[in-house]
């Protein structure tokens, strides 16, 4: 790692290296409940809405008791709408309530409420996992990438998952755009998840790019 790359990485992780799971209060581990909560968060983040609102809506859903697939499935459609509304997720609340209910039912019926069964069905293959994730309503390629970026912290089978959004942020900061080279800058799957989240944030904001570069040059 070059001196400049190291400085950029230090600033980046220090200022922006919090995972979206962390922001939503999800203590991610290889257990059914937090994995499901990540799926819910990925669904919410997939819409054209700010990440802050998606995170706030996830918190409201979990606070209301819908942090498990059975809890989400058994909640009424209106209760889910109301929780989303409390998180200000209002443009997409009705459609998202339906998708979350149907997705929870799919997970319970097909994988017994446990996303580890989905992973095992895919043989731990990253593309296979993404394909199965996209069977959930509201999860397309973007949502699958969001899930995989975060879950690589606890599913070493999918690491490193560094998609185009992440690599775009890396390129703007002068970091390697090659997944293998970029992954070598950090050690663990947890740090890869943090790096991915930070680079996604950077990719959205020219101001953030300049801030990180300026701080790293001091």
Image (spheres, rainbow, N blue to C red):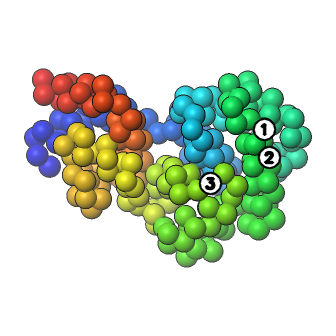
State the SS at label 1: helix
Q: Position of residue 168 (x, y in %)?
A: 31, 47
Q: Position of residue 60 (x, y in %)?
A: 71, 30
Residue at 70% of width from left, 55% of height from top?
137
Residue at 21% of width from left, 36% of height from top?
8
Question: Where is mark 1, residue-wise?
Answer: 94
Asked if residue 2 shows in the view, the reply is yes
Distance (Cα) linking label 2 and label 1:
7 Å
Q: Position of residue 129 (x, y in %)?
A: 56, 67
Residue density around tag 1, few if under 14, some if 14–19, many if 20 or more, within 10 Å: some
Residue density around tag 3, few if under 14, some if 14–19, many if 20 or more, within 10 Å: many
Residue at 27% of width from left, 31% of height from top?
209
State the SS at label 2: helix
Left of 138 or right of it: where is 174? left
Question: Where is mark 2, residue-wise?
Answer: 98
State the SS at label 3: loop
Q: Position of residue 56 (x, y in %)?
A: 63, 28
Question: Where is mark 3, residue-wise?
Answer: 139
């Amino acid at each position: 790692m070059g001196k400049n790359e190291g400085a950029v990485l230090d600033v980046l992780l220090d200022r922006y290296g919090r995972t979206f799971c962390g922001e939503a209060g999800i203590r991610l581990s290889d257990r059914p409940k937090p994995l499901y909560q990540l799926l819910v968060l990925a669904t919410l983040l997939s819409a054209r809405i700010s990440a802050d609102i998606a995170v706030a809506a996830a918190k409201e859903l979990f606070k209301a008791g819908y942090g498990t697939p059975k809890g989400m499935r058994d909640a009424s459609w209106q209760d889910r709408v109301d929780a989303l509304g409390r998180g200000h997720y209002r443009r997409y609340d009705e459609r998202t309530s339906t998708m979350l209910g149907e997705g929870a039912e799919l997970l319970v019926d097909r994988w017994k409420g446990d996303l580890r069964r989905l992973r095992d069905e895919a043989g731990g293959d990253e593309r296979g996992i993404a394909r199965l994730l996209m069977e959930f309503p509201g999860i397309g390629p973007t949502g699958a990438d969001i899930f995989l970026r975060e879950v690589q912290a606890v599913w070493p089978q999918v690491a490193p998952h560094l998609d185009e959004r992440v690599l775009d942020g890396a390129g703007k900061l002068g970091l390697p755009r090659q997944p293998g080279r970029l992954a070598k800058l950090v050690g663990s799957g947890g740090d890869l998840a943090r790096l991915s989240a930070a680079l996604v944030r950077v990719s959205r904001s020219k101001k953030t790019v300049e801030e990180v570069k300026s701080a790293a040059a001091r």
